[in-house]
Image (cartoon, rainbow, N blue to C red):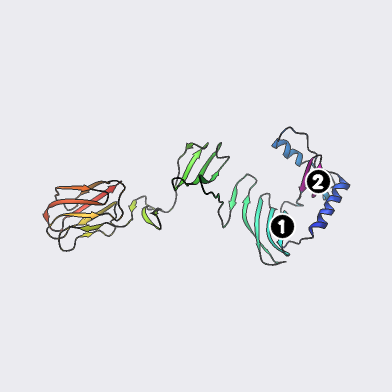
């Protein structure tokens, strides 16, 4: 939609004259404190003639600047310009929602693009961006919910500076936790410090796969001991080499405490014992060639 704009000073003078000639637009009842229902009712009291509903009006100590649309699909907005070229717009444009727009191009062919829309029901849609809450200490959080976070329910994304910890929390009334549902065609978990890599995922079939780096084998006999192609620190199958009396799998990433591991043999091989530390799983078995051992380790 092409918008034509006129000098602000002349517009304000005209509005002031209209207010002086035709009186205030609103009849606002006396209030003790703020009453939303009374406030809305007061703002909807209009005086004729209809063509003077847009303007700056004063009633007692209250002053109102009003932009009144002439039709449901029309616009009532404020446009910000940079040397004649429109760059932003705030208002009810084409419907009853509040639109926050930016504009590209030059006069008179600017293109207005919605960046945020607040619906009549209070819903907020943000386009090509993210609502942000910046902080340098304490907790920075963003809440998406149906009311005030302390009295309603919401999904909170937060970062705690003291613990260097990010959270996604489903909560009601600020401190009552509710179920959190993650949905998608598979859910992937990435971990790391300076950089991140995939550590695990739930597939679209609902299977849990550990996809982190594989451990390193040593003392597994001669020849070519090997791990299966999808092995990780959490699970895998070891095939020992020639005349092996055991095998050590050194984890790609050390555990914080020695993990709990279960070891079995899909080939029916017998083993004497196995042990774990924060850095490795060690299997001891009678001398054999090509024995296979499957392990599952969790923290």
Tell whether 152 sits left or right of 75.
left
Q: Give the range drawn in magenta.
A: 54-65
Q: Identify the mark at residue 132; answer none if there is no mark.
A: none
Residue at (63% x, 48% y) in the render: 119
Residue 106, position as x, y percentages in the image: 69, 67
| Residue that badge 2 annotates | 57
What is the spatial separation of the Cα atoms under label 1 and label 2, in whole angstroms?
Answer: 20 Å
* Figure disc tally: 2
Residue at numbered disc 1: 79
Q: Can residue 94 be seen in this view?
A: no
Pick the quarter of the image with the N terminus: bottom right
63 drawn magenta? yes
Residue 157 location (% of width, % of height): 50, 47
Secondary element type, mark 1: strand
Q: In this view, does 102 lie above or below 179?
A: below
Q: In this view, does 217 lie to the left or right of 39?
A: left
- In the picture, measured across the screen, residue 86 lies left or right of residue 276, that is right
Magenta-highlighted stretch: main secondary structure?
strand
Q: Position of residue 145 (x, y in %)?
A: 55, 43
Residue 58 in sight:
yes
- Indicate the position of residue 37 as horizontal and vertical percent values: 70, 36
Who is closer to the viewer here, 157 or 45?
157
Query: Label 2's element?
Result: strand
| Contact (Cβ within 8 Å) of mark 1 with mark 2 | no
User: From the viewer's perspective, is residue 139 above or below residue 82?
Assistant: above
């Amino acid at each position: 939609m092409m918008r034509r704009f006129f000098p602000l000073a002349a517009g304000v003078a005209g509005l002031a004259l209209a207010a002086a000639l035709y009186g205030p637009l609103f009849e606002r009842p006396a209030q003790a404190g703020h009453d939303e229902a009374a406030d809305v009712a007061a703002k909807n009291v209009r005086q004729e003639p209809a063509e003077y509903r847009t303007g700056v009006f004063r009633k007692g100590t209250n002053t109102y600047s009003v932009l009144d649309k002439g039709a449901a699909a029309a616009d009532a907005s404020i446009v910000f310009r940079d040397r004649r070229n429109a760059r932003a717009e705030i208002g009810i444009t084409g419907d009853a929602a509040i639109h926050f727009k930016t504009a590209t191009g030059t006069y008179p062919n600017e293109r207005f693009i919605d960046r945020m829309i607040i619906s009549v029901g209070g819903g907020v849609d943000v386009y090509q961006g993210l609502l942000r809450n910046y902080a340098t200490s304490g907790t920075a959080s963003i809440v998406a919910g149906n009311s005030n976070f302390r009295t309603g329910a919401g999904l909170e994304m937060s970062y705690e500076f003291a613990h260097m910890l990010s959270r996604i929390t489903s909560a009601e009334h600020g401190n009552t936790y509710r179920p959190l549902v993650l949905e998608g065609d598979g859910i992937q978990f990435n971990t790391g410090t300076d950089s991140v890599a995939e550590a695990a995922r739930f597939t679209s079939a609902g299977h849990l796969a550990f996809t982190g780096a594989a451990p390193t084998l040593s003392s597994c006999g001669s020849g070519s001991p090997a791990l299966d192609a999808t092995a990780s620190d959490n699970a895998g199958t070891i095939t020992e080499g020639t005349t092996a009396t055991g095998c050590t799998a050194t984890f790609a990433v050390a555990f914080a405490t020695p993990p709990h591991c279960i070891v079995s043999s899909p080939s029916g091989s017998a083993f004497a014992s196995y042990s774990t530390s924060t850095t490795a799983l060690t299997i001891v078995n009678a001398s054999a060639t090509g024995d296979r051992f499957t392990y599952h380790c969790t923290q």
